Image (tube, helix red, strand yellow):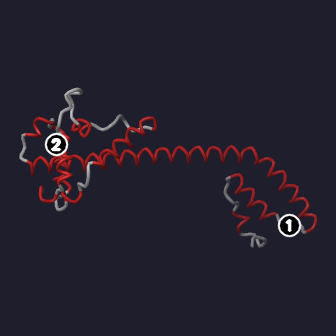
Amino acid sequence: MLSRLTGETRGRLDALLVIDPRLKRSPYNRLKHLPKPPSLSHLQEWLDQLEWLVSLGDVEGPLAGLPPLKIKHFAAEAKALDAHELKDFVPPKRATLLLSLIRRQRVQARDQLATMLIKRMNKIQQRGKEELERWRSTHREKTAQLVSVRLIASSESAPGKFDCTTNIFLCWWTGKNFPAWCLQSPHFS
């Protein structure tokens, strides 16, 4: 595993376990804990976390060949340990555990961001549907009056020709089903 890592990546992994004397915490704590529950108000925290996780370097290359279930197991093991305990592992095992946890946290961060996006798009779509229905209901009566004026004018010039077309339009506009007699009408063409 270590042979697949660049010196820079090894340095980043080791830096995760260095405890800041002021904060009495290591960057490893940030790695283990994801931000608050996904919501629009916490969006920036999730984006910052994902950006930080990506800045830790390539994890896919070194983990290539490991089954996903094994990676998940290693990530869970790493998450259960603290920085002091992780330092006690031999370098290849420590690197594998850290890379697995980084990968798992990236996947979870991306999933949460995608979920937030989907929820937001669903709300936008729902508001659009509601606004369209409000608009249709306010204009439905006016449209029906215009169609009836057109119907009267058309029936005077060509009796019976536009009855079916107008009924189909009114059914579509009001959201009702087409009457069966209309679809069988010889005027429907």
Please tell me whether residue 84 is drawn above or below residue 60 in the rendered image.
above
Horizontal and vertical percent position of residue 49: 34, 42
Residue in the picture at 89% in, 64% down: 154
Q: Quadrant of residue 31?
A: top left
Q: Which residue is mark 1?
A: 160
Task: Give the class, few, some or many, for how many residues have Cα within 10 Å of label 2's Cα (few <14, many ≥20).
Answer: many
Horizontal side of residue 47 vs 16, given as left or right? right
Mark 2 or 1 closer to N-term? 2
Disc 2 secondary structure class: helix
**Quarter that holds the C terminus:** bottom right
Q: Which residue is mark 2?
A: 78
Q: Quadrant of residue 67?
A: bottom left
Horizontal and vertical percent position of residue 148: 85, 55
Q: Nearer the viewer, mark 2 or mark 1?
A: 2
> Which three-letter amino acid code belongs to the residue tagged 2?
Ala
Horizontal and vertical percent position of residue 44: 42, 39
Residue in the picture at 23% in, 54% down: 59
Q: Quadrant of residue 177?
A: bottom right
Disc 1 secondary structure class: loop
